[in-house]
Amino acid sequence: MNSGYQGITPTDVFLGIGAILVGVLVSRVWFELMIVLFKINDNLQALRDSKE
């Protein structure tokens, strides 16, 4: 019967490293998107102010 603690396998290590890398990549894309949206907002405000 296979029950209880089985230890950390190399697969677990690689999955952990992969999860960290994916998390870093997803957060980088999210923050870059936020920067782009704020720059678009700044440009739209400047355009609106120049029309007034």
Image (cartoon, grey):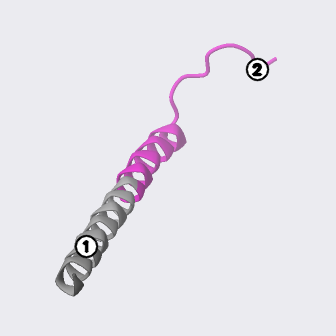
Task: Kindly check if marks 1 and 2 are in contact, taking CB atoms under 8 A apart as contact.
Answer: no
Name which of mark 1 and mark 2 comes first in the sequence.
2
Percent coordinates x, y for residue 20 in the rendering: 39, 46
Percent coordinates x, y for residue 50 in the rendering: 17, 84
Distance in Å between CA atoms under marks 1 and 2: 64 Å
- Secondary structure state at the residue bearing disc 1: helix
The amino acid type, in three-letter code, at marker 2 is Asn
39 left or right, relative to 18: left
Q: According to the image, label 1 marks what residue?
A: 45
The residue depicted at 30 percent of the width and 74 percent of the height is 40
Query: Label for residue 2?
Result: 2
**39 is higher (above) or lower (below) than 4:** below
Q: Which residues are magenta?
A: 1-26
Viewer-nearest residue: 36 or 40: 40
The amino acid type, in three-letter code, at marker 1 is Gln
Direction bottom: furthest residue = 51
Asked where in the image residue 26 lies, by quadrant, the reply is bottom left
Label 1 crowd bin: few (<14), some (14–19), many (20+), radius 10 Å: few
The residue depicted at 52 percent of the width and 38 percent of the height is 12
Work out which quarter of the rendered image holds the N terminus and state it: top right
24 left or right, relative to 18: left
Direction top: furthest residue = 4
Q: Is residue 28 magenta?
A: no
Q: How many marks?
A: 2
Percent coordinates x, y for residue 8 in the rendering: 50, 28
**14 is higher (above) or lower (below) than 32:** above
Mark 1 or 2: the one toward you = 1
Work out which quarter of the rendered image holds the C terminus and state it: bottom left
Query: Label for residue 17?
Result: none
Percent coordinates x, y for residue 11 in the rendering: 53, 43
The residue depicted at 28 percent of the width and 65 percent of the height is 38
Label 2 crowd bin: few (<14), some (14–19), many (20+), radius 10 Å: few
